[in-house]
Image: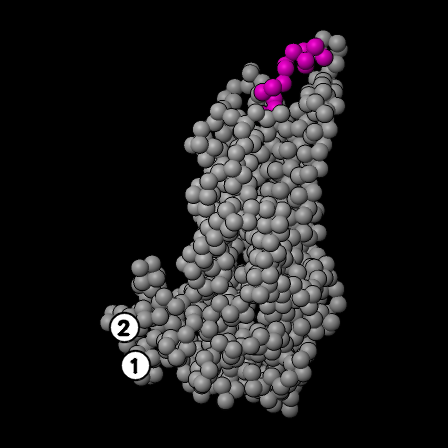
Amino acid sequence: MKLTKTLMATTALTVTAVAAHAQDMADSMTLVSWGGAYQKSQVNAYAIPYQEMHEGLEVVWDESSNEAVAKLRAMDEAGNVTWDVVDVVASDAMRLCDEGLAMEIDPDEHLAPAPDGTSAEDDFGDLLVSDCFIPQIVYSTTFGYRTDMVPEGVDAPDDICDVWDTETYPGKRSLEKRPINNMEWALLCDGVAKDEVYDVLATEEGQQQALDKLDEIKDDVIWWSAGADTPQLLADGEVFMGSTYNGRLFSVIEEQDQPVAMMWDAQVFDLDGWIIPEGLPDDRLARALDFIYFATDTQRLADQAKYISYGPARASSAPLVGQHAELGIEMAPHMPTDPENAKNTFLYNYEFWADYRDDIDAKFQAWLAQ
Amino acid sequence: MTITVIEPKPVSFVAPVVAAAGAFAGLFVGTAQGSALLGVIGGAIIGAALTFLFLTIFRQERAARWITTLGMAAAGFAFGGAMGGVIGLAFGWFFGWFIFWLGEGRYRAKLPPYTTSLQVFYHFLFRVICGMIFFFLITPIVVVMPLSFNAENFFTFTPEMLRLDPDGYSLKHYRDFFTNDDWQQAMWNSISIAPIATLLSVSFGTLAAIGLSSEHVPFRRPIMAILISPMIVPLIISAAGMYFFYSRLGLQGTFWGVVLAHAALGIPFVIITVTATLVGFDRSLTRAAANMGADPVTTFFRVQMPLILPGVISGGLFAFITSFDEVVVVLFVGSAGQKTLPWQMFTGLREQISPTILAVATILVAISICLLTTVELLRRRSERLRGMSPG
């Protein structure tokens, strides 16, 4: 009897709290993302349905995720945080969290449970890599190659070490202009066992070994810095193969119909998700939390996969992934997390790179300049 | 009329020159085909052979020129399809003309008869260098234009485009620009911010220039230096400074914040151009006007303003273009609601290489050309009306 009463009282309280919130929520919200097809998928899957539920809400998109850390620092310094919800990669979220620029999230309080009642914390599982980070998608950095530039009588490349095999597969390669991923791939192809890669890379000799391996193809590499570069270079036939985000390659292959195919071997998973800046006024914070609760529920994450080939971060969303919204093709086989594609994968090693990034970056840049 | 003697030149002089030009043309053709060296050698040999043929064996200018033009067009077509044909046609026409222009000695026709060979050489070398600088400046802009009609979503000359196949071209990127909300929003932001910023910079800049050119103002030079500093200080520094300053004032992320920031950037241009026109302004005119009973305001608008108007207009034009082209300051001072065209192009180029950017660039280039032509025509008209230049 007492228990029921308490329960009822709590429910009543929660209801009033939610109602009070609804009144105090700001009627405009600035979301920050990456632009391009990725942002479009978020607009379609999250923002449009959310706006339909809340009439009169104005949503402004800012395509500044690339410089989110620097801008949030400046905003904090100037005491004028204009962003409400910011889309960043996991490593940026960790930095922002450490610096106190992002708000800590309690998954079980701020995020929706799965439809079967599993708590949000269990549903996201290992992907909750930081206290401030609300994972959205799993993407991977992997290779695409021109199918029409594979020499005759040779099998299509299906091994990460084919990147180094310029005799069998002549042509330029495009690689990202930073050590992350490239160093791992280089060691892997220099005979280092997969589970020892980071142990080796932690040593001076290991770093030199990776750079020496990269040196073999240095003359054949075009370095990219924006995700759109490799698709452009592949479409141009300027490179034979290149690394980029798998969603970009999906767009080149399926939407733009270019003669390009995926080489999933040794793809590196990374996470992208939301953070809420620290120190928002109450009404905007209420709006941001309300949006996050809605936009990261099981169905919404699955919906995003209709527009772009990134895997939803919730375990419960995976079975709901359907067909592409315009092309009508099944999206599951294009997900980096699909078992067929994920035979040999890495997960971005956040701890390792947090510790070694500055050091290895300096060496890598010095090597590039040689 | 001319007294310069035009006489045919020996093959031993013409052939090497044409061969050099041929080698230069061959460098481009050869590089495009994958072997620069082969192109250079081939171009030189073809140039020399044609010269020899036309100047010794077959000296019939009209027929020879037709043969080279059509022959090269056919060869270009055979090797590189329609686009190759067009390039061959242009090369053929040029070399047919060039051989006889040199061979007949016509290149001296417009020069005084006493010029030495070296002077003639420098005369044409100068022109060639000017041409190459012009080419260097204009090509990056021109290349963008055909690409903006690409039917694909990449910055690529597709095989269809090179074949001049209509299927390779489309207006879809222009359609995207005019129908996409992001681009339209950015365009309206640019169109509403730039004129207001221009108006502010022209008003303040002109007043400052007039004040600073009166002799009795103390500390004129330091004040001038401070006022034109936004032009000299690296933009990123002004932008960061404005960001923190405007944040405290509550102007960061507002329409008026961006307008004021752009006005500050535009003022130096107006000050410089107006100060330059004021140098030629005769101060006794204002005294004469005052003598006739006009108050200073009337004097300014009726006497001074019409005379310095060209400086004001060109300063205003620079201020407008500064605001219209500016991306660094707006990234700091603006928020997503004030996204201007350059901002949209900047993020678009980084996140998603879409030819819509090229379509926008083409439209902007066309607008700039129209704007500059109009201003130039107006200027000439006013000069003509004032009888400053004949015709």
Q: Residue at x 73, y 15 (%)?
A: B295
The picture places residue A57, in percent across and down from the top left corner, at: 71, 64
- Mark 1 surroundings: few (<14), some (14-19) or many (≥20) residues within 10 A: some
Label 1: which secondary element: loop
Above or below B316: residue A164: below
Q: Please state which of residues B145 and B340 is positioned toward the viewer in this rendering.
A: B145
> Is residue A185 something one can see in this rendering?
no
Dot 1 or dot 2, earlier in sequence: 1
- Mark 2 surroundings: few (<14), some (14-19) or many (≥20) residues within 10 A: some
Disc 2 marks which residue?
A: A209
Above or below A345: residue B46: above
The picture places residue B4, in percent across and down from the top left corner, at: 54, 27
Q: Which residues are magenta?
A: B275-289
Quadrant that contains the C terminus of chain B: top right
Q: Is residue B372 left or right of residue A243?
A: right
Q: Is residue B366 left or right of residue A209?
A: right
**Main SS type for the magenta part?**
helix
The picture places residue A358, in percent across and down from the top left corner, at: 34, 63
Residue at mark 1 to residue at mark 2: CA–CA distance: 10 Å
Tags 1 and 2 in contact by the CB under 8 Å rule? yes
